[in-house]
């Protein structure tokens, strides 16, 4: 039970970091793609 | 027929929605801001006959056209995810905001059509420039209207009006709708401006031709004027927004200002400190290259940089050492001197705004007589790039703050504050679609909420 409570408590920050990381991945990915298709025209 | 409770492995459904919406907003806000900045630049090109405005407007319009796909794809993916993961909540929102979503969809469609047409007829309407500029502004306006519609929904989720579902005026114009919309309207310009400035800085450092260096140096200056110029309006609008939250959802206000989510604001002031210092330092540097020698103006700007530093320090000092207990950032619970909201943070924020206005006024005065572009130092361009990165973090932090506010202590967390819980249960008689204690959508009895 104590392990579960600890897991729930830790999952908040872990989710935050994972979410933040995923946003940055999508964001930089889409910018890079747009840059790549727009250059050398 | 019961609806299955689907979940996403490892990250969970809340993170899935957050990631898709935040990523979408980062593109949507840029597109709205960039279209309006590009249309304004095109108009300025028409008035001043300076070719760089035209070059800038056209390249930005082209980039927006290309970037639109990413923003739109993320929006559709987000709606799909919402329907799949939160079907009850989504149908509930549809009941309350049906017409708002209809207008939103058509504004989005209109924006796409006009943006594409605007870029495509650039040469065709070269001799009817005034008409062409109107295309850009209409596209920007439609983007703003789409944003206004979704702001009604987003603000309602945090500060729902205690009104029936048919009372469109009260659900649409809920307590925080107007301040949120103002905050985002100004934010679009600031965010897009800083990103443009960062791009200008990056390209300036990579350019070897004098004409390109001159153009990208100007682009950095032009972007930063939009970025910082609109940023300094944000504290007062943000204060109005926070006041609205405090009045209608006090527990949510306490959570994000004093509770376990207050670290968002500590982080925010840190990010604003970077933006303010980097922008002011850039302005001070740039004043060296004014066509007309302005030693006094520059000295005043140096003074302004000092005051910016002072006020940002005042903003950064936390209330207590209990900064982010979730990750163990705790340095004691006693109150830190100068860390209180009243009067210190007010002095810090108002001071930052006043100094901001002062330094922008000085800079605009110098701009009127012109700058020698193409000679800026590397460090000034790094400052622009730092601003671009920082503004992205600021956007993510602010979005996360608003959405975390409904969690309060997570007992329970809400999707619509005090109405619909994270597990999609309607808990208050005061919610729309609840009549005489019965949820008119699914027929369940609702007992919470009093009256």
Image: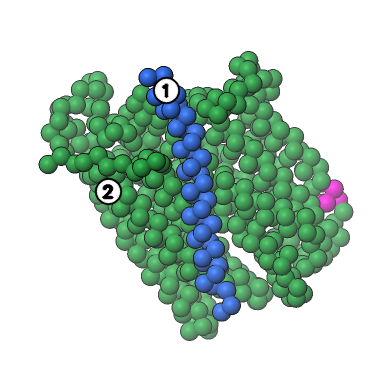
Q: Are marks 2 and 1 on the same chain?
A: no
Please give the chain letter of the residue carrying mark 2: B
x and y percentages locating residue B68 in the rendered image: 44, 64
Q: Quadrant of residue B88?
A: top left
Query: Secondary structure beneath disc 2?
Result: helix
Dot 2 corresponds to which residue?
B83
Membership of B298 in magenta stretch: yes
Say whether residue B8 is visible.
yes
Query: Secondary structure beneath disc 1?
Result: helix
Residue furthest top in the image: B334
Q: What residue sits 46% from the left and 73% below the top?
A: B118
Say whether residue B96 is visible.
no
Dot 1 corresponds to which residue?
A3
Q: Which chain is green?
A: B
Color used for chain A? blue
Membership of B401 in magenta stretch: no
Q: What residue sits 64% from the left and 38% below the top?
A: B270
């Amino acid at each position: 039970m104590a392990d579960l409570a600890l897991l729930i408590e830790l999952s908040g920050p872990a989710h935050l970091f994972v979410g933040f990381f995923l946003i940055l991945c999508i964001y930089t990915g889409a910018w890079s793609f747009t840059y790549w298709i727009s250059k050398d025209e | 027929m019961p609806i299955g409770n689907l979940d996403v492995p490892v990250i969970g459904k809340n993170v899935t929605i957050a990631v898709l919406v935040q990523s979408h907003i980062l593109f949507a806000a840029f597109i709205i801001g960039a279209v309006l900045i590009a249309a304004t630049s095109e108009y300025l090109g028409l008035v001043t006959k300076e070719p760089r405005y035209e070059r800038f407007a056209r390249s930005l319009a082209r980039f927006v056209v290309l970037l639109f796909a990413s923003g739109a794809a993320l929006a559709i993916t987000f709606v799909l995810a919402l329907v799949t993961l939160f079907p009850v909540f989504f149908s509930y929102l549809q009941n309350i905001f049906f017409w708002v979503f209809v207008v939103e969809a058509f504004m989005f469609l209109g924006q796409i059509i006009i943006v594409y047409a605007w870029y495509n007829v650039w040469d065709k309407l070269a001799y009817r420039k005034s008409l062409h500029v109107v295309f850009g502004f209409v596209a920007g306006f439609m983007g703003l209207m789409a944003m206004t519609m979704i702001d009604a929904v987003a603000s309602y989720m945090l500060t729902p009006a205690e009104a029936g579902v048919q009372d469109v005026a009260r659900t649409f114009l809920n307590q925080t709708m107007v301040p949120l919309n103002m905050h985002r309207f100004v934010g679009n310009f600031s965010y897009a401006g800083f990103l443009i400035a960062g791009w200008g800085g990056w390209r300036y450092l990579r350019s070897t031709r004098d004409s390109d260096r001159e153009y990208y140096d100007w682009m950095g200056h032009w972007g930063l004027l939009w970025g910082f110029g609109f940023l300094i309006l944000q504290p007062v609008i943000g204060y109005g927004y926070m006041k609205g939250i405090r009045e209608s959802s006090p527990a949510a206000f306490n959570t994000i200002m004093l509770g376990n989510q207050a670290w968002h604001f500590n982080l925010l002031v840190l990010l604003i400190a970077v933006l303010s210092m980097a922008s002011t330092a850039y302005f001070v540097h740039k004043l060296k290259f004014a066509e007309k020698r302005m030693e006094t103006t520059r000295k005043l700007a140096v003074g302004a940089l000092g005051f910016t530093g002072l006020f940002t320090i005042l903003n950064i000092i936390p209330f207590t050492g209990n900064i982010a207990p979730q990750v163990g950032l705790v340095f004691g619970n006693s109150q830190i001197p100068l860390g209180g909201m009243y009067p210190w943070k007010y002095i810090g924020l108002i001071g930052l705004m006043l100094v901001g206005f002062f330094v922008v006024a000085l800079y605009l005065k110098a701009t009127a007589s012109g700058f020698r572009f193409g000679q800026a130092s590397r460090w000034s361009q790094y400052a622009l790039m730092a601003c671009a990165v920082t503004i992205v973090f600021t956007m993510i932090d602010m979005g996360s703050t608003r959405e975390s506010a409904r969690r309060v202590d997570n007992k329970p967390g809400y999707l619509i504050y005090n109405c619909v819980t994270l597990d999609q249960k309607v808990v208050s008689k005061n919610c729309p679609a609840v009549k005489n204690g019965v949820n008119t959508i699914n027929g369940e009895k609702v007992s919470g909420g009093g009256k």
